[in-house]
Each structure stands twice: as structure tokens, then as C-alpha cells.
Image (tube, rainbow, N blue to C red):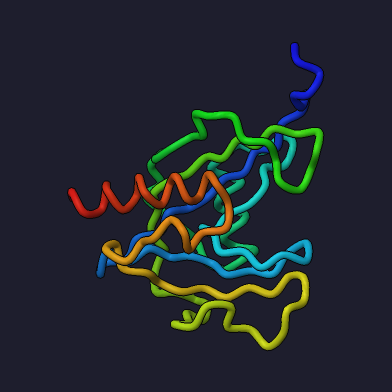
Amino acid sequence: MNDELPERFTIRVYALIINENREVLITDEYQLDVKMTKFPGGGLHPGEGTIDCLKRELMEECNQEIEDLQHFYTTDFYQKALFWDDRQLISIYYLARLKGEPQFKISEIPFDFPCMVNGSQSFRWIRAADINPDDFTFPIDKHVALLLKDYLLRK
């Protein structure tokens, strides 16, 4: 094995939440001193399944239950983790719906929070036709944005 390659994995699980208007929920965050736009979700904990992880993450981030989860995509290319030198990143994406009406603030303005402090987060909907990979921060999200846009426009 190449000494340059990581020997550990980080697994992240994300929700592709689509509403009745064919809009996708995205989150703008300030974490680890970085502004980021991504899909809602987060890191898998040891002993946790991917769906349980996603349900926990949505409760933590949105105080919201999700339903109708269907696997959409799992990383199929090598991606080094951005924040850890010794890890490879694997991301898993599920199509999902919010259970009930949103229980959190939806904004139309990116990064709609008072100040850039770690942990700040806001949410917004984007129309399927307006999905632009360049609006996402991370390489796998950019790839999934293209796949999702194609999926939604064909549906």
C-alpha cells in the first residue's frame, strides 16, 4: 500500500431533502473556522447505522424527523478528508422528506446568521433547475449536486 494514502476512514451521511415544489434543502454553516454550503447531515458515530446517523443529525441540526429514506449515492472515487490528513472520506446520501412542516427557520439569504462563529448554521431551499455545483463547498457535494439536478429534472 502507498505510504501516502490514509489508513483510516471518515464516514459522513447526508439527506437530500426535496419538498413538494421540487426544491432541495441546503445548509450554510460556519464550522472549523470555514464557511461551507452543503447538504444537511454529518458524521457517523461508532456503533451507529447510516440511517440512524442521518435521523440523529437532522434532529440535532433541525429538530426535525425525516421519512421515506432511499439511498441515492455513495462515494465511488477516492477523496481525502479535508480536515484530517490521515483519513479517507466516504459520503453516503439519502433522498428523504421532512416529517411534517419545517420546524426550523428557512432563509433566502446564504449564511443568514448574526456572526461567523463556529456552529452557526442556516437553511434554505434551492429549486432543482437552480442547483449549481459551484455553490457547494466540498468536492463530493459538487458531484452529488450534478447527479441530483439531473435526477430531479428527468423526474
Task: Judge from the rendering whether residue 78 lies leftward or rightward of residue 114; answer left or right.
Answer: left
Above or below, 21 against 107 in this view is: above
Task: Judge from the rendering whether residue 71 lies leftward or rightward of residue 87; answer left or right.
Answer: left
On the image, which quarter does residue 5 sit in? top right
The residue at 67%/42% (across/down) is 44
Spot occupied by residue 125 in the image (x, y as percentages of width and height): 40, 71
Task: Judge from the rendering whether residue 69 lies leftward or rightward of residue 22; answer left or right.
Answer: right
Spot occupied by residue 146 in the image (x, y as percentages of width and height): 36, 49
Spot occupied by residue 95 in the image (x, y as percentages of width and height): 39, 49
The residue at 25%/69% (across/down) is 21
The one nearer the camera, 143 or 117, is 143
Residue lying at the far left in this picture: please name it: 154
The residue at 67%/47% (across/down) is 43
Task: Judge from the rendering whether residue 1 lies leftward or rightward of residue 14; answer left or right.
Answer: right
On the image, which quarter does residue 34 sit in? bottom right
Residue lying at the far top in this picture: please name it: 1
Number of marks drawn: 0
Name the image quarter holding the N terminus: top right
Spot occupied by residue 68 in the image (x, y as percentages of width and height): 37, 49
On the image, which quarter does residue 6 sit in? top right
The one nearer the camera, 141 or 50, is 141
The residue at 49%/83% (across/down) is 109
Above or below, 13 against 104 in this view is: above
